[in-house]
Image (tube, rainbow, N blue to C red):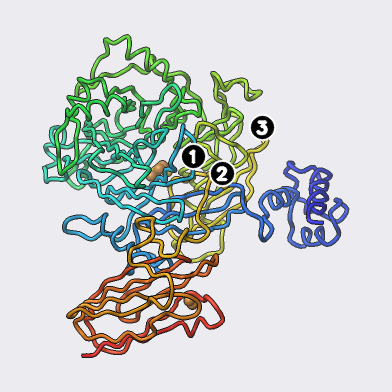
Amino acid sequence: MKRSVIVLLLAALLAAGCGGKSPAAATPDAGLPADAAAVAAERGLTPDDIYAAVKTYTPSGQLDPYIMIASGGQSGQLLVIGVPSMRILKVIAVFTPEPWQGYGFGGSSNDVLAGGDMANQELRWGDTHHPGLSETNGEYDGQFVFINDKANARLAVIDLRDFETKQIIKNPNANIDHGGTFVTPNTDYIVEGPQYAAPIGGDYASLDNYAEVYRGLITFWKFDRLTGRVDMARSFQIELPPYWQDLCDAGKGPSDGWIFCNSFNTELATGGVELGNPPFEAGTTKNDTDYMHIFNWKKAEQVFQAGQFDTVNGMAVIRLQTAIDEDVLYFTPEPKSPHGADVTPGGEYIVVGGKLDPHVTIYSFEKIMAAITAGGLDVDQYGVPVIPLDQSMEAQVELGLGPLHTVYDDKGYAYTSLFLDSAVARWTLGGPYSSLHAEEPWTLVQKLPVQYNIGHIAAAEGDTASPDGGYVVALNKWSIDRFANVGPLLPQNFQLIDTSQPGDQMRLLYDLPIGMAEPHYAQIIKADKLKAFEVYPEVGWNPETMSVDPNAITAPDQARVERNGNQVEIWMAVIRSHFTPERVEIKQGDHVIWHFTSLERTRDATHGFALSGYNINLSLEPGESQTIEFDAHTAGTFNYFCTEFCSALHLEMVGYMLVEP
Ligand code: RUQ
Ligand code: CUA
């Protein structure tokens, strides 16, 4: 029945000349079933609207073929969104405490958050920019996702078996990052690119000494898949000139082993508009070109392993001069204030968008290698060899105003966000991609307006070695008039675009308001690559160690309270619809260690544990174990209760904690 309605709708679309710009509402004579046509007519839906509805409508119980993992911007979190339904499935708590997940309110997540603290400052938010899914052979493998915190130069590791954050690591030598996270094709390293230059290690230095003391810094975090953690002892950094390095991408295929990063502020501007200096916006954009940074990371790894580094704050730093001497770093010019650097699926080209240039510039990895091999290169003011633009460039394509980021599909098209034009540009790749499309290589095919001010852009598997095509999502910074007025702070607008048809057939399908932050990048993975647990694999599972916790219990009759001096230790069983024990009687000043085990094996039978007056709130998913520790600082009568409506007698899932003065 459902299928036949769709067939009828599609027939109607054809009959109505779908794809045309006719504003005429569908009418019953268009061939729609009478009731559907009546709804369409009543709502004033055009054939284009009906097409978009049919492309995105996902009946209850049907699952999306793609999952988008989007940065959550200054919320500090990640978003999980189904594509094409554009339903928000989850917010993953990363840098910011989140009560629903019991994240940061007792339990092991407190340790995860504390792992990202600075020596003298607790950090409880982040500005997430670029999620990086783990890859095997340049393809998403669905195991992990990594995300940076631009505000504090931190990196987080999320395990996609339970979609929970396992590690936050503070970069000891940087205060800001941006060009991360992205991974090398087999996730050997998670790369965290820098942004605003600063003295390495963050010491004080006058801006008068900018050129001599301030530096850029790129970090290669070694990822250990077995432990699911970054290993700082096997990670290294490379000192860079104090240009402001921006987004980066890893080579693959022929360019595997190399990394490409944009930079701006090769002018070495230091601001000070209040002192009569040019403001940063003018000072950093004077030069016609900046430098793309070209790293041989496999060579850098050898340099690191050979011990050719200084240790700064416990971290190996390969000095700039060593990087130059060991052929680790090269430059090539890029037009005015570049932003995105995106390697093509086969690894042959790097596409760079210049914010103040109407073109994207396409660099050939083969040409770059030939220039390096030929040698005899001039150097920049810091001694880094510079490959002239005419020796590295393959093509330029004029797209429009404000090109930023580029993703790809399976038809040899590239999609570039045009911030100032508020449009998505579809254009053709050349070289080995020419046979995939009918158009001329390196030409603009279509510009689709989006609403408004698009920043990043994401495509189905669009930055992997084999993009899927079909969908692109425009991550728009402004929404202005797209949604009901909810006051001066407006949501962002994620717009789903249909890219299934070739040529100038891109269409806008759906608007998803994001009312929690300004997300930056997103990646879209095939849903069947994700193999998350339905319930934790065994009762007593500790999500921090991903194994059964030694303090877990397996039955309610093992629940108990033990006192040792003024330390009270509690082993609590949690199962519908009660906690065991239901009474905890302690004394003011006691130190309490409280272990929880959910004995549930039923999918979605999650319990919460909230303790009044003590800022404690856990989420106990089926099979999960957790431990909290606190001092009973306040005497009185307190309740603990379940915060998830888990059963008809959920309100009875409660207990008393009596703290005797
Ligand atoms: S940025 S809008 Cu952080 Cu990726 Cu380009
Ligand atoms: Cu357990 Cu409500």
Q: In the image, ligand 1 is in what quadrant?
A: top left
Q: Quadrant of the C terminus?
A: bottom left
Task: Indicate left or right for 455 with 423 as reference.
Answer: left
The reply to whether dot 2 and dot 1 touch (C-beta < 8 Å) is: yes
Q: Assess disc 2: are there few (<14), some (14-19) or many (≥20) residues with their C-alpha within 10 Å of its C-alpha.
A: some
Q: In this figure, which residue is indicated by the disc labeled 2? A: 526
* Type of amino acid at the residue the image marks with label 1: Tyr
The image quarter in which residue 244 lies: top left
Q: Nearer the viewer, mark 3 or mark 1?
A: 1
Number of callouts in the render? Answer: 3
* Type of amino acid at the residue the image marks with label 3: Pro
Task: Report the front residue among 2 and 135.
Answer: 135
Task: Report the front residue among 48 and 76.
Answer: 76
* Type of amino acid at the residue the image marks with label 2: Lys
Q: In this figure, which residue is indicated by the disc labeled 1? A: 140
Q: Assign a secondary structure to mark 1.
A: strand
Task: Indicate left or right for 87 with 554 as reference.
Answer: right
Task: Report the front residue among 232 and 525.
Answer: 232
At horizontal 20% and vertical 21% (from top left) the residue drawn is 383
Which mark is drawn over residue 267? none
First in sequence, mark 3 or 1: give its number.
1
Asked if disc 2 is less than 8 Å from ligand 1, the answer is no
Question: Marks 3 and 1, Cα distance to the nearest angstrom?
Answer: 25 Å
Task: Indicate left or right for 543 with 645 as reference.
Answer: left
